[in-house]
Amino acid sequence: MSRDLTKEEQGKFADMYGAGLTCVACGNNDVSIKIWEKFGTDAAQVGGDIGPSGIIGAIVACDLCGNAETIDRGRLLKAG
């Protein structure tokens, strides 16, 4: 299951993984971040664990140009 992060969670995500607040293609600051939670965690709920132990992947998609950056499991684990 997946969900979009709230604006507050996007800041936390950016701090943890160094990605998420700006489109890598056009520099736009209006992005959406969709996460996929790890089974058995509370990451599906707002305010849940979005650290490497809570999610298995994420996509940062630009709301302006549509470019998307994948944050895969390996990258999550390196950041954590």
Image (spheres, rainbow, N blue to C red):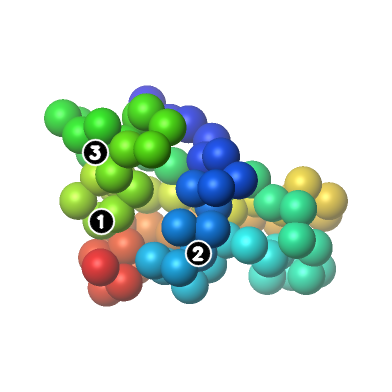
Give the quadrant of the C terminus: bottom left
Which residue is at a point 34% across and 48% down the rendered structure image? 50
Give x and y (percent) for residue 41: 20, 34
Q: Amino acid at mark 1?
A: Pro
Task: Say left or right for 30 vs 73.
Answer: right
Spot occupied by residue 42 in the image (x, y as percentages of width and height): 26, 32
For residue 7, which numbered disc appears in the image?
A: none
Residue at far left of view: 40
Q: Identify which residue, 56 or 40, lies in the foreground.
A: 40
What secondary structure is found at the residue carrying circle 1?
Answer: loop
The kind of residue on which mark 3 rests is Lys
Task: Tell me the distance, in whole angstroms, between the alpha carbons under discs 3 and 1.
Answer: 9 Å
Q: Which residue is mark 1?
A: 52
The Cα atoms of the two marked residues, 2 and 1, are separated by: 13 Å
Instruction: Report the side of 58 relative to 40 (left or right).
Output: right
Q: Which residue is mark 3?
A: 38
Quarter of the figure that contains the N terminus: top left
Number of residues whose C-alpha sits closer than 10 Å to that of mark 2, classed few (under 14), some (14–19) or many (20 or more) = few
Mark 3 vs 1, N-terminal side? 3
- Identify the amino acid type marked 2: Ala
- State the residue position of label 2: 14
- Locate residue 26: give its quadrant: bottom right
